[in-house]
Amino acid sequence: MSAINRQFRLAARPVGLPKRSDFNLVEDPVPVPGDGEFVVRNAYISLDPAMRGWMNEGKSYVPPVGLGEVMRAYAAGEVVASKHEKFPIGSHVAGVFGVQEYALSNGKGAHLADAKLAPLPVYLSALGMTGMTAYFGLLDVGAAQAGDSVVVSAAAGAVGSLVGQIAKIKGCRVVGIAGGADKCRMLLDDYGFDAAIDYKHDDVKDALKKHCPQGINVYFDNVGGDILDAALSQLALHARVVICGAISQYNSTSGVKGPANYLALLVCRARMQGMVVFDYASRYGEAARDLGIWLAQGKLKSREDIVEGFDTFPETLLKLFRGENMGKLILKV
């Protein structure tokens, strides 16, 4: 085992897009576990849009990452030292281990990952927080039912692609919004969406009228901004709008643009609700069972976009905000 643990620590609160100088790459000794603790050697680190919000100071659903602290991130790897009976040496585990090569954990928020059932990266995508977000966001907050018209933004991304597939499994009609012909083709050919809208070339509002002539029953939003407004204009009676993210707004330097079209909620007697996956922690097992069965049956596809090289973290993170990732963006350590 290496004696050195490389870590990316937050050095400054980003203004606009994060840059390399907002992080310090430091070397620390590999931690030694005490009683009830274990050390994991991270093999894969999850890169998520939410990380941008965690860098900001201010009220949120979790405390911000402190300056000088290891950047928060989900990761998966192998236990290399342990004084914790549930996490023996050699076991694979996923949890909030941070952007570092080795992490010390007391087991809180961590769970074993059976690498025989699925490759480790899948425990950061369909069988991880990404899958949980899609599952509970669509089925609990969105209350999607067979026959509903479901529209998903950032549909070729990690969460969006799973939302659309789960909606299809549940008997919904699914329309995905994504950027570029390749992503739209993937939605139709790989994920089985009923229609795809290319926001870079199509008039989104007109396309939603065409593909959802009876209105949108569930709109799952990962984008915010103009696309959210376009979806609000096409809601069906008693529609549900799930606010999962707003990637178009995360790096704004002029303030967040709120929905101008919110009166559609009144007219359609619709509801808009925010969704944070941590609220469903007591039910993760339920989602994991369903997601695992669908993966095994081939009804659900988990796609990972894996980039090699721990040192590339600051630059690789930006792929999310440029829309360059196809599926779940993961850094291979």
Image (cartoon, helix red, strand yellow):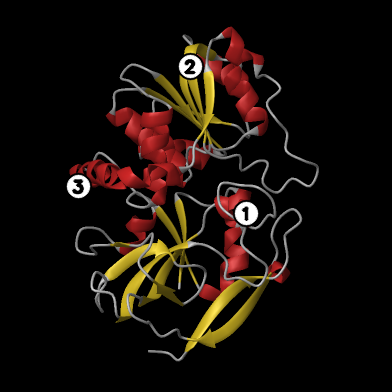
Instruction: Answer whether labels 3 and 2 touch (C-beta < 8 Å).
Output: no
Name the amino acid, label 3.
Ala
Residue 238 against residue 96 in the figure, above or below = above
What x and y, as percent, mark residue 44? Answer: 41, 67
For mark 2, give the secondary structure.
strand
Residue farthest along the right direction in this orientation: 254
For mark 1, give the secondary structure.
helix
- In this figure, which residue is indicated by the disc labeled 2? 239
The span from disc 2 to disc 1 (Cα, nearest Å) is 29 Å
The residue under the point 57% across, 66% down is: 71
Residue 296 in view (yes/no): yes
Mark earlier in primary sequence (2, 1): 1
The foreground one among 126 and 209 is 126
Q: In which quarter of the image is residue 138?
A: top left
Name the amino acid, label 2.
Ala
The residue under the point 26% across, 42% down is: 286
Mark earlier in primary sequence (3, 2): 2
Residue 202 in view (yes/no): no
Name the amino acid, label 1.
Arg
- Lateral position of residue 281 relative to residue 88, left or right: right
The residue under the point 65% across, 58% down is: 55
What x and y, as percent, mark residue 7? Answer: 55, 77
- Lateral position of residue 197 relative to residue 66, left or right: left
- In this figure, which residue is indicated by the disc labeled 1? 52
Q: Quadrant of residue 88?
A: bottom left
Crowd class of label 1 (few under 14; some 14 to 19; many from 20; radius 10 Å):
many
